Amino acid sequence: MKRKTLTVTFGVHFIIRREKAKNGKAPVYARITVNHQRCEVSVKKWVPVRDWDSRKGRVKSWKDEYKNLNSFLEQVRTILVEHYQDLVVENEEITPAAVKNRFLGLDDSGYSLLGLFDYHNDQMQKVLKWGTLKNYFTTKKYVVLFLENHLKRKNIPLTLLNYRFISEFENFLRNYEPLDHHKPLGNNGVMKHLERLRKVITMAVKMDWISKNPFISYRLKFKKVNRECLTEEELQKLENKNIEIQRLRYVRDLFVFSCYTGLTYGDVMRLSPANLQPGIDGELWIFTQREKTDNPVPVPLLTKANVIIEEYREHPKSVSRGTIFPLISNQNLNAYLKEIADICAIEKHLTFHLARHTFATTVTLNNGVPIESVSKMLGHSKLTTTQIYAKVLEKKISVDMKYLKHKLKSKRDK
């Protein structure tokens, strides 16, 4: 209930619960007082009972670890004061419990950031593909880490989100060092998490759960990335290499198939005989839809791709699945591609998606296929997406300029 704010006395004092002491240490609590009413909230810290100054509400000891603790307590005090001030500005009823709830990430409206993520992910289960949806779970994981490690809280109300929150979250992502084997996030990785956070918060704005979008003045800053692909020579080396190990030969064939069709891993694994139909020219085409976007994908079959189809379409595991190719996991496929790169003496980091880049660049654009046609075969909604995937190789520039020189020379000789 909102009400006009009268004169309010507010204070924060830190105490220890001696009755909960273990091994000489007691837990620290922040006591919040508003107009002689009070409540307490744990700050998740323990201190030696003998070193606690009850009057000052801090540790007596001058040891570095306790200096840090006193500094932490002052940070908690600052946060609690900010919550109190927010309640004043918002003309909300000011009680110790209201300040405590803000500190714990609870809100009278019930709309919190983590609750918003849960709502979004639940609503999008049947809208987004799992490969896309799981990225929102990852972004939520980073938000939880940020709240716990940087803001020292378990959640945050939507009403407290602002430009500063986003800026500090960006800085946290840039400096976060994973404890597992994963690499730290690069610039574009950071931007993708912020992009997903923006989409989730935009949902809250549209549903009137938050009055102002904190992203309104924030600009995502993606860096252009050169998409690596195989050169024509590397592709030929891969195609012609005699690989005796059956599992590696199969993976090589799948990779080469994608190099000549541009299909992703998911699209290749779903490919069925029904997707092979005569095209407008009477030749065999692949007609399918991108798993990620459901955009239609029409691809005329090049000879090399057709040869690979004929080799595997009658395989028992293909027939039992009703698909062109036997099933293999994306994880195993990419792991085997590393072995294949070593066998073929290719220094580039082979992943299945690199085959898609190779189709866009080396196989099509570099051989004069218009970018509009390449975009259609890749199933892109926008031409700008294709321009990111496909770079014009120096060899193509050289060929084009030689043609131009020849054309100019012919004009002068006339």
Image (cartoon, rainbow, N blue to C red):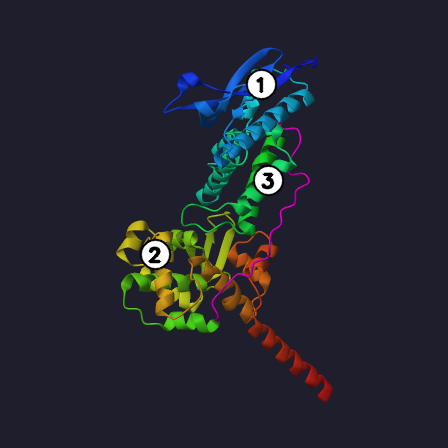
Q: Which residue is mark 1?
A: 98
Q: Position of residue 335 (x, y in %)?
A: 36, 57
Q: Does the stretch in magenta take in 224?
A: yes
The mark nearer the N terminus, 3 or 2, is: 3
At a point 61% along the width and 29% down the height, the residue shown is 160
> Label 1's element?
helix
Foreground: disc 2 or disc 1: 1
Residue 71 sits above or below residue 90 on the image: below
Amino acid type for the residue under numbered disc 3: Glu
Foreground: disc 3 or disc 2: 3
> Label 3's element?
helix
Give me the disc on residue 166: none
Using the rendered view, name the quadrant where residue 396 is placed: bottom right
Q: Residues within 10 Å of mark 2 (few under 14, many from 20)?
A: many
Amino acid type for the residue under numbered disc 1: Ala
The mark nearer the N terminus, 1 or 3, is: 1
Q: Which segment did they paint magenta?
A: 208-231
Q: Which residue is mark 3?
A: 168
Using the rendered view, name the quadrant where residue 253 is placed: bottom left
Q: Is residue 153 left or right of residue 215?
A: left
